[in-house]
Image (spheres, grey):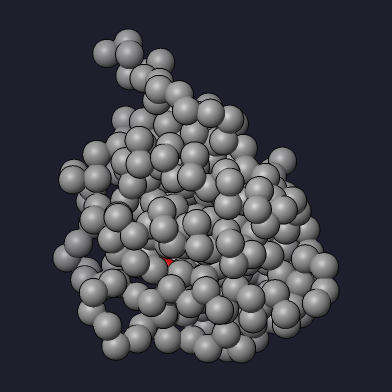
Amino acid sequence: MKATRKVRVGDVTFGGSTLVVIAGPCAVESREQLELAAASVKASGAHLLRGGAHKPRTSPRTFQGLGSEGVDLLAEAGRRHGLPIVSEVMDSAQLAQMAERVDLLQVGARNMQNFSLLKELSRIRRPVLLKRGLAATVDEWLHAADYLLDGGNENVILCERGIRTFGGETRFTLDLAAVAYVRSRCDLPVVVDPSHATGLRELVTPMALAAAAAGADGLMVEVHPHPEQALCDGPQALTPVGFEQLMQRLQPVALAVGRSVSFTGARAVPVPAILEAR
Ligand code: PEP
Ligand code: MN
């Protein structure tokens, strides 16, 4: 087994001894929503802030994201809270405006084999978070990563987010064996997204703990200040308090597998200053 490659995103290192936690809403919806999410996940020890601005939705009649304005809001919240930001790029037209502003560019599950997008991303220096396609084998996923690596971008992080199987109880089936398989086949850091994998809030923390135990280098978790009002993926979003509890419970599991997390103890989720003033 090769040592894991270290991929730096801002001042955060994937593939090192710290279990890196990415958290935030599915979609950027408003400045207020994002501020509440960012302040709370930061207070609980998250390392990066996520938020979709360009959303790949199954139906064109659902919220498609705020687009470029959403990227601006995410960048602003990331700066304010000292969190590097992660957001999905769906095509090359979006890449032009996102490459400079987004610290970690996400390739979504539905785009894992968008080879022209991968080739474009291979030519830039920004790190890429490559999600596994929802019907992709692990080897197909690793070949997709090769497009980035062979084209010259060495900063690739993999993300297992569940695959389609036959059960309907969960949104997808989280393939944790893939984490160990990837680890035995290549040196890329791998993170696990228990939110999309399960689609159910109450399963997110158990699967996050299992992912840490299986050797994942990080987690990506959806957190919304008011999940019942979310414009996208509300049923799988943790509340800020739920995320705090996840971080707390992660601590002993991470330590047991030789990693640290940055949770430093239970604390009340603060009311962000910009909202206090209203
Ligand atoms: C996401 O993380 O916002 C997302 C759309 O996930 P996936 O591509 O894994 O469905
Ligand atoms: Mn989502």
Q: On screen, 255 above or below 211?
A: above
Q: On screen, 127 above or below 36?
A: below
Q: Which residue lies furthest to the right in this view?
A: 2
Q: On screen, 226 above or below 210?
A: above
Determine if residue 204 is in view: yes
- Looking at the image, which residue is at 54% across and 40% down? 46
Coordinates of residue 250 in the picture (x, y in percent): 53, 47
- Left or right placement of residue 170 versus residue 18 in this view: left
Determine if residue 14 is in view: no
Q: In which quarter of the image is ligand 1?
A: bottom left
Coordinates of residue 129 in the picture (x, y in percent): 58, 63
- Left or right placement of residue 195 versus residue 158 in this view: left
Coordinates of residue 87 in the picture (x, y in percent): 49, 54
- Looking at the image, which residue is at 33% across and 19% down? 275
| Relative depth, front residue between 172 and 60 | 172
- Looking at the image, which residue is at 35% across and 41% down? 242
